[in-house]
């Protein structure tokens, strides 16, 4: 089973999450960062073109052999779908059409969701914005693993399995930790996605629907591009709860690697996050950072000092510390 993780509990913090405080300090010194707020004009067109090209590629998959389908799903289709997932992350911050047009943003997210196959675009926003406002909150931040996960997957082999199954934990964890009643738009979006999936199966066959779904699931698990799930907030150095990555995979993930910058300034689009770092390097250059998402996955699995418990957590308001 491999070495057991050394931690037996989360890192509990009595302080507030750090980003709101740092944002205030940075803006006092660099108020020009506010000029970066608002959507990137090119972003919505990049999302539309990527989605259309991915949908078009489905036609090319239907007559391929199964081994080729699965290799392409892991190496290409899953990567594009993961990129679209991070486009939906940007859209959750109103970076499609801006905060004045919430329905346009939601429709763009539902469109980008189609080739992914897993209906999540509308629901994701409801939970993700609370992850920003209440980072580390034991109830409201569903990005944090549960005690069940941490206790079950507490060895090298266990962490390997946990990484493989990561998409299922991300999907199911909110239902147990912080369930919410579905909205009408969520029901509509899920219905549209399931109808689209059925249409793909009906007209293109099993290989194509497998290419869509398996690619999305594999690229959220043991996959280099999925390293950001762990690199962002798992405590690789004691006392630090958010980490940035400045490597080349930012090019296909809308700069989600600039994660300290993103949490400090969630109103800045991904395309302009490097400018935040350039304007205020004294606040970011000396923070712990990652240089490889593949190394992050390897270290997470192999290092007994890191595991699902390696997260900074805060008591929910109203509960005793």
Image (cartoon, helix red, strand yellow):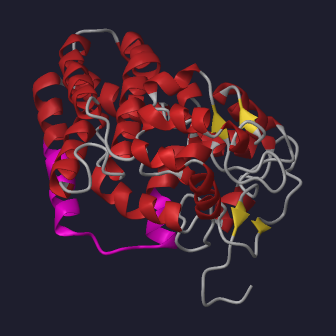
Task: State which quadrant residue 73 falls in.
Answer: top left
Does the rendering let one see residue 201? yes
Tell me which residue sits at (19%, 40%) in the image: 111
Relative depth, front residue between 3 and 219 = 219
Q: Give the residues in magenta.
A: 172-195
Tell me which residue sits at (42%, 32%) in the image: 271
Q: Position of residue 21 (x, y in %)?
A: 64, 64
Q: Position of residue 24 (x, y in %)?
A: 59, 61
Q: Position of residue 59 (x, y in %)?
A: 18, 15
**221 relative to 34, above or below:** above
**175 relative to 199, above or below:** below
**73 relative to 289, above or below:** above
Q: How many marks?
A: 0
Lateral position of residue 210 relative to residue 15, left or right: left
Relative depth, front residue between 116 and 286 = 286
Tell me which residue sits at (36%, 57%) in the image: 125
Lateral position of residue 121 relative to residue 159, left or right: left
Whether residue 70 is in magenta: the answer is no
Lateral position of residue 82 relative to residue 311, left or right: left
Does the rendering let one see residue 214? no
Q: Position of residue 246 (x, y in %)?
A: 62, 28
User: Which corner quadrant holds the C terminus?
Assistant: bottom right
Tell me which residue sits at (44%, 24%) in the image: 252
- Provide the major secondary structure of the magenta segment: helix
Task: State which quadrant residue 184 falls in.
Answer: bottom left
Task: State which quadrant residue 301 falls in.
Answer: top right
User: Which corner quadrant holds the N terminus?
Assistant: top right
Lateral position of residue 1 relative to residue 209, left or right: right
**148 relative to 250, above or below:** below
Whether residue 182 is in magenta: the answer is yes
């Amino acid at each position: 089973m491999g070495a057991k993780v050394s931690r037996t509990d989360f890192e509990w913090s009595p302080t507030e999450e750090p980003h709101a405080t740092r944002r205030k300090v940075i803006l006092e010194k660099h108020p020009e960062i506010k000029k970066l707020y608002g959507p990137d004009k090119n972003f919505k067109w990049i999302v539309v073109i990527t989605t259309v090209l991915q949908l078009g590629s489905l036609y090319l998959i239907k007559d391929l052999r199964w081994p080729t389908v699965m290799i392409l799903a892991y190496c290409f289709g899953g990567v594009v779908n993961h990129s679209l997932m991070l486009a939906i992350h940007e859209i959750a911050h109103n970076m499609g059409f801006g905060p004045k047009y919430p329905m346009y943003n939601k429709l763009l997210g539902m469109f980008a969701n189609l080739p992914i196959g897993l209906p999540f675009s509308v629901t994701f926003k409801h939970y993700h914005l609370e992850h920003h406002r209440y980072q580390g909150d034991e109830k409201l931040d569903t990005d944090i693993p549960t005690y069940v996960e941490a206790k079950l997957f507490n060895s090298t082999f266990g962490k390997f399995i946990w990484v493989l199954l990561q998409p299922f934990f991300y999907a199911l964890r909110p239902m147990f930790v912080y369930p919410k009643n579905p909205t009408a738009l969520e029901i509509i979006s899920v219905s549209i996605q399931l109808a689209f999936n059925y249409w793909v199966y009906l007209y293109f066959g099993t290989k194509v629907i497998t290419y869509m779904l398996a690619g999305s699931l594999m690229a959220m698990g043991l996959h280099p591009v999925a390293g950001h799930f762990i690199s962002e907030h798992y405590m690789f150095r004691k006392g630090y709860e958010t980490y940035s990555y400045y490597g080349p995979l930012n090019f296909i993930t809308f700069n989600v690697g600039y994660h300290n910058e993103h949490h400090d300034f969630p109103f800045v689009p991904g395309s302009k996050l490097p400018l935040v770092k350039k304007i205020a390097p004294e606040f970011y250059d000396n923070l712990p950072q990652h240089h490889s998402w593949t190394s992050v996955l390897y270290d997470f699995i192999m290092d007994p000092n890191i595991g699902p418990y390696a997260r900074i957590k805060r008591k929910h308001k109203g509960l005793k510390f």
